[in-house]
Image (cartoon, rainbow, N blue to C red):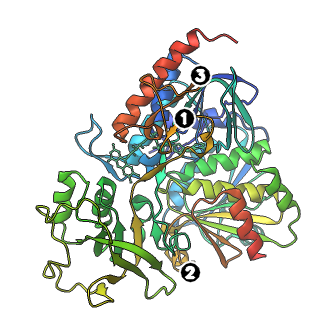
Amino acid sequence: MPILDEKIKQEVTKILANMVKPITIKLFTQGMECGYCKETHELLNEIVATNDKLKLQVLDLEKDTEEVKKHNIEEIPAIVVMDEKDHGIKFYGIPAGYEFSSLLNALLMVSTGVAKLTDETKAFLDKLEKPVDLKVFVTPTCPYCPQAVILAHQMAYYSDKVTAEMVEVSEYAHLAVKYQVQGVPRTVVNEKWFQEGAAPEQILVEKIKEAL
Amino acid sequence: MDFNISFTAGAKPEELYDLIIIGGGPAGLTAGLYAARYKIKTLMIEKMPVSGGQLTATEWVENYPGFPEPILGQKLAKDMETQAKLFGLEVINEDVVKVELTGKIKKVHTPYAVWQAKTVLISTGSSPRKLNVPGEAEYKGNGVSYCATCDGPFYPDKIIGVVGGGNTAFEESLFLAKYASRIYLIHRSDNYRADEILKERVEQNPKIEYVPFYQVDKIDFANPDGKKIILSKTPNPGNVIPAQAGIRPVLSNPTHHPESVGLRPTTPSDEKMELTVDGIFIFIGNDPNTKLFEGQLDLENGYIVTDRSHKTNVEGVWAAGDVQSKALRQVATAVGDGACASYWINKYLEEWKE
Ligand SMILES: Cc1cc2nc3c(=O)[nH]c(=O)nc-3n(C[C@H](O)[C@H](O)[C@H](O)COP(=O)(O)OP(=O)(O)OC[C@H]3O[C@@H](n4cnc5c(N)ncnc54)[C@H](O)[C@@H]3O)c2cc1C
């Protein structure tokens, strides 16, 4: 049973026709595929089939230890969207529902090389000295969430100092507890600082400043 | 499993559009559908990576005709969007930060580009009104919410305060009751504006209790194990209809929930109360998203004034939906406004000359 219906597949094809550079999608899963690993795998198969510039590489959390270490994978399913280089753009959990837009956005961004950020934000990111990690907690039915995910991924793409992960909380109950997620989106900056809601660029920048 | 795509990828800032629609709620999406079918070159700019506006924050819509079984707000939004895109509507996800509406060519600025068009339709809708009490901004997303569909699932078996007395407060309380163990519906008076059918359902729901004649003074969620809100008796509850039929205020009906422990007076006369909750949801009405247009368009209480063809006081600029100064703000009316506005815009474009 295909995961994407025909209409959506057509939309995906149309959007990805704007891709420029080839993209590698790395999926981390397991032999015995976990909760949503199977669906995530099938989803990526279907997306990759729409465009020659996309390549899917499936890796095993237990066997491919080197890759796991290289990309700093903590949970499965995990998706890394990259070109020849890992920009620190990750998805933990299936990017379904509204998060599907976040995935397409990441593919287009890396492929076209355009991160939509204001000049002020870029100037701030240019000056970063310390690493910044952004974990964005979401649920697939939260309409405000992709905004937070896309912003974090844009920062990660633009700056080598920034890494950004979407975390679909309903798949990782332990993380919801650990990071005290009571509402989504919630962006966690460097493990300790929290930003609630789909905050505009400047507000997230302020939060990052606080965390540094 | 559902997959939502919020944007198309054919829009280019160097193009001159016939029409730019600002805001992709029901009004903008319907206008976009009509415009796409008129084959006028249209771009919809929606700041969220999701179209549908307030519909996406709505659980069930029961009063939109054509769906005798209630339809999920998010599903209705997505279907509206898919339908408009099917006819070729271009959608981008950028935040409009500035507009230049006078002159033949209108300019619409986002942080990343300037988009140009012969006409502009404003359908920026409205946003939830804030209580403006201490603690509200501080704990937003951390116990304070304006969206039950988004955050309701985080409150299984929890106690929730809901503020408001209209349709939205009632609908969303019913939705939250699916998760929460108890809901206190706090309102300034006992004059509830919700539709009768919603009142009946709330009253039949054993989890929901009315707390009439109280207002929220403060949200104190500093202690995660003792979150509370401070209420005080409404000094002037306005036009109170005494003892409305069917309404059972919790205070006058202590037997409704004999085990009720969350609510306790902190002054002998019940002037002030403390309510122990795990979260608070606020549904006290909306404010129009019209800051961008102040000084450029005629506004009335913040809402955009239009004529019968949905035209504003500036040539080439229309407004549709919640953002308009009008009596009823619903999906059905927003959709009608959007369709009408597109009709008049199409007529105008037929005669448009540089
Ligand atoms: C919880 C809730 C429950 C409801 N239940 C019902 C119901 O059961 N039945 C019913 O008929 N109605 C209901 N409503 C009301 C209904 O949702 C609204 O009347 C309707 O959505 C209005 O549509 P609109 O297109 O005018 O505006 P909106 O839905 O507000 O859409 C406006 C859009 O414009 C975008 N926007 C704003 N500013 C900008 C900018 N600067 N740049 C780019 N984009 C911008 C916003 O992101 C938004 O997507 C409910 C509302 C809420 C909040």
Label of residue A186 in the image = none
B199 to the left or right of B55: left
> For this rendering, which residue is in front, B332 or B216?
B216
Residue A64 visible here: no
| Label 1 crowd bin: few (<14), some (14–19), many (20+), radius 10 Å | some
| Label 2 crowd bin: few (<14), some (14–19), many (20+), radius 10 Å | few
Residue B66 appears at what percent x and percent y? Answer: 27, 34
> For this rendering, which residue is in front, A4 or A186?
A186
- The amino acid sitting under disc 3 is Glu
- What kind of element bears circle 2? helix
Determine the residue positioned at 61% across, 71% down: A75
Which residue does the numbered mark 3 point to in the structure image? B315
Determine the residue positioned at 27% across, 65% down: B189
Which residue does the numbered mark 2 point to in the structure image? A178
Determine the residue positioned at 50% across, 71% down: B136
| Label 3 crowd bin: few (<14), some (14–19), many (20+), radius 10 Å | some
**Looking at the image, is B117 positioned above or below residue A189?**
above
For ligand 1, tell me if the residue under mark 3 lies within 8 Å: no
Pointer 1 chain: B
C-alpha gap between disc 3 and disc 1: 12 Å
Which residue does the numbered mark 1 point to in the structure image? B298
> For this rendering, which residue is in front, B157 or A62?
B157
Residue B203 appears at what percent x and percent y? Answer: 17, 64
Pointer 2 chain: A
Q: Do labels 3 and 1 touch, CB within 8 Å? A: no
- The answer as to whether the residues below labels 3 and 2 share one chain is no
C-alpha gap between disc 2 and disc 1: 50 Å
How many labels were placed on the picture? Answer: 3
